[in-house]
Amino acid sequence: MAFKLNVNGHTTSVDVPADMPLLWVLRDVLNLKAAKFGCGMAQCGACTVHVGGQPVRSCMYPVSQVGTKAVTTLEGLSANGTHPLQQAWETVDVPQCGYCQAGQIMSAAALLAKTPKPTDKDIDTAMSGNLCRCGTYLRIREAIHKAADMGSNAAAKTVQTAGKE
Amino acid sequence: MKRKDSTQNVLNRRSFFKISAVAGGGVMFSFPFASDLLAQGRGGAAPPPPNPNNFIKVALDGTVTIVAKNPETGQGVRNMLPMMIADELDVDWKNVRLEQADFDDTKYAAQSSGGSTATPNAWTPMRQAGAAGRALFITAAAQKLGVPEAELTTGAGKVNHASSKRSATYGELAAAVAKLPPPDFSRLKLKDPSEYKIIGKKHSAYDIGKIVTGAPIFGVDVTLPGMLHACFEKCGVFGGKVVKANLDEIKKLPGVKHAFVVERPVITDAVLPGEPGLENGIAIVAETWWHANSARKKLVVEWNEGPNAGDSSVGYAKKAEELGKAAPQRTLRADGDADAALKSAAKVVEASYSYPFIAHAPLEPQNCTAVFKDGKLEMWGNSQQPGRGRKLVADTLGVAETDISLHMVRAGGGFGRRLTNDYMVEAAWIAKQVPGVPVKLIWSREDDMRHDYYRPGGWQNLKAGIDASGKIVGWKNHFLSYGDGETFASSSAMGPTEFPQRFVPNYTLQSSVQRLGIRTGALRAPSSNAFAFVIQSFIDELAHAAGKDPAQFRLDLLASGAPLPAPPAAGGGRGGFAPPGMNADRMIGAMKLAMEKCEWGKKKYPAGTAQGIAFHFSHMGYFAEVAEVTVTGTKVKVNKVWVAGDIGSQIINPSGAENLVHGGVIDGMSELMLQEITVDKGKVVQGNFNTHGMVRINQAPIAIETHFVKSTASPTGLGEPSLPPVLPAIANAIFTASGKRLRQLPLSKAGMSWA
Ligand code: FES
Ligand code: FES
């Protein structure tokens, strides 16, 4: 089936089965590799992207459900890695293997868009769907606070614009 | 110490250090790696001289390129080794570029990651290589400026002459350096730690820019023109075979290009020990992974499950109970007379502990990409032991190793799972069936969890006696594990010097094994990840039975040890040297630091909150850890963990080090509470993170404090040793907080959960 998708501000057409999860459309058809496959059943969050500004587990999100909603992946979060979260992630040196981090950053971006100054509790609640096998959780908390300090307004704006494109 | 000497000796042979001009200007230094040199020293026929193919390139613009030859799985090796070189070379870290090497055993003798070995192997030779480069730039600058070398200093890729205020950049000097002979290594002066500008400073991961922007750097991201995607269905029972399957139907499904049975050939050549490799199964190759996996769901297969179909966790436990009651099959160690000591002891404590099989489950599922063309294989993989992987592929497919090229890609976690290479041989096999077409194989999470090399489960029946003064006088352990006769299954053994051997005068270690139909292997801190929980929990029981403070009891025990026997001569063991046993003074140092930082015994906690302590020595690292927990009914909250470690004189990258310690603590918490693999009718029951869980951010401690004792020992690795003590530290805290002594992992079996 043909679908017209708005991904990271670009409109593209794909011809794929209607039940194909967005994750595999992004990875294998559109060659956008940031979103990762970790579990395939909404357990790990490695595949998190935004659809219409909301964080979704793309491994279980059929492409047919996307419709006209804008899809944002980590590749499209900022023009060149300058989103406050990306900067904070670099300063805090969050990753170990790095595999979960695309999903972590996308969940964090959705959190900051709604809650520009989150508490530890807000962070724990918003991020509990994202597993990190390497155990970088303390740095994830630290980096989200840092990004919030760096420019909660900027962060929120970027995400909302990305979501509306 | 033997290790250091042999390393220095070989590197003193200046002939191994090569200097050459680089096209377009610049200079390249090539040198062998420590393990390459040490590999030469292992018995057998005279080895070829080491090939100096690790390199440092200095370009005209001062950019320094360093080859990274080892696999990166998240342990930070890509930062650490170049940091050692760059500091001694005296260049600016921001001008350093890394280049990932392909696998090539004609160039490098050892390319692997595991066992926390990279740091101890690299510490001396990497710094020497950098210092040799720096010496050459000084020589070239002295000639150019016409001044004595002694008047020159270096910094940020420049040689400076202070009195004449002249300087020359490394780039400017590169052409002259290319013509110089190698320096005399015996006269190289390595920096005093106070002079370090890069080592000991926090540096974010080299690839972080790519990680935070989602660049395709992992194994699963490999993409080639015309590539197809594969999945591979295996029998749930290890070793099962396909009798028949509805392949004709499968081939007609959307997107499917190929579907075929893979039958493991009879391999007459040596199969690698502990690595059975290719399993029988059905490969489906399709346009996208989703197409392949959707078709897989329609597979109807009749399996011949073979001899392992009767295996079950219930059966293992029953057999263990029988073995535990019978006389032990073997005695692994008997110091003094433990039976007599127990008889005359003032108090005897007896307890049985157990721990389950667990899976590695790195977040990136197993995968590999391969293309077979004109009799040659080209592969992209993220194995922790690519050399063994290539041999496995060669032996299984009957392709010469020299006809297999292998690119090393970043791994989304390893933890020991990628020490074995079954996914690699599957990808190669599938690619060979569709010549000329690149194929990427990705396992599902269920494939990964049900076809692992599991951390072996086991049981330990312990008995110890304490005298009237509270000293342990006798210790007996009947260790129940898996294996066959005198052979333990992979990673299922206990060594004869397991703690508290040497610290208790009468010590007996006996074992019994039962056969096993699933595969086992090394998981981060192998054996230690289970043994520390048992031994440090039991020691806690003894402390309480003796009416002693658990920390002081441990300090007294450590102080009572017989001296450390001399280490075996160099030449054997891992990397050419046998790791030494535990030095009690270093562990006492770690204990005291942990106690000081957590204010052991000084805090007043409300009922239900308490601290617990434990220590463990593994992979040459000394770790003492304290956990503060709050127990509310069956809910446990880990408020804070204090980690004190001694891994030698220098923490190379404090940022990476702290991150790895956090990882050790959180990984240990997952093992303690959540993880268990069970077997039923020969098949692994758990398939995904909903049944084999992991600590989530809301369960992670509020704080983890990391402290290091700076000892005089040469630096050692940190991938593993911070993990083992956290399990008993938390379990001991739970006991103090709630009175519950939990002896069976995971604690969820006793109805406990993380708050
Ligand atoms: S891959 Fe989607 S949640 Fe794990
Ligand atoms: S950094 Fe490895 S899974 Fe999170």
Image (cartoon, grey):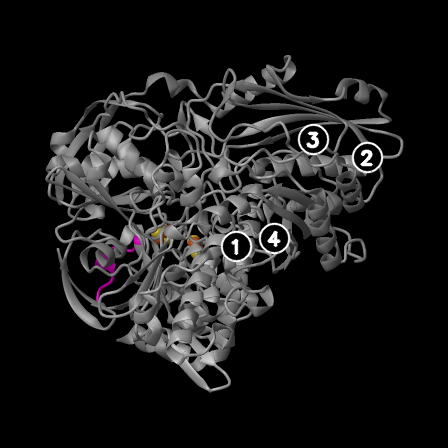
Q: Nearer the viewer, mark 2 or mark 3?
A: 3
Which element carries disc 2, helix, strand or loop? helix
Establish whether labels 4 and 3 are both on one chain: yes
Q: For residue B387, say whether it is visible.
A: yes
Task: Using the image, tell me which numbered label, if any, was put on residue B660.
Answer: 1
The three-letter amino acid code for the residue at tag 3 is: Gln
Q: Earlier in the sequence, mark 1 or mark 3?
A: 3
Write down the chain letter for disc 2.
B
Q: Nearer the viewer, mark 1 or mark 4?
A: 4
Q: Earlier in the sequence, mark 4 or mark 3?
A: 3
Residue beneath label 3, please? B501
Image quadrant containing the N terminus of chain B: top right
Establish whether labels 1 and 3 are both on one chain: yes
Which element carries disc 3, helix, strand or loop? loop
Establish whether labels 2 and 3 are both on one chain: yes
Quick check: marks 4 and 3 in contact, CB under 8 Å? no
Which element carries disc 1, helix, strand or loop? helix
Residue depicted at 21% across the width and 59% down the height: A31
Measuring from the top left, give residue B91's x and y in whole percent.
Answer: 43, 71
Question: Mark 1 and mark 3: span between their CA atoms?
Answer: 29 Å
Q: Is residue B735 left or right of residue B144?
A: right
Which element carries disc 4, helix, strand or loop? loop
In the image, is residue B117 part of the stretch drawn in magenta? no
Quick check: marks 4 and 2 in contact, CB under 8 Å? no
Residue beneath label 2, please? B545
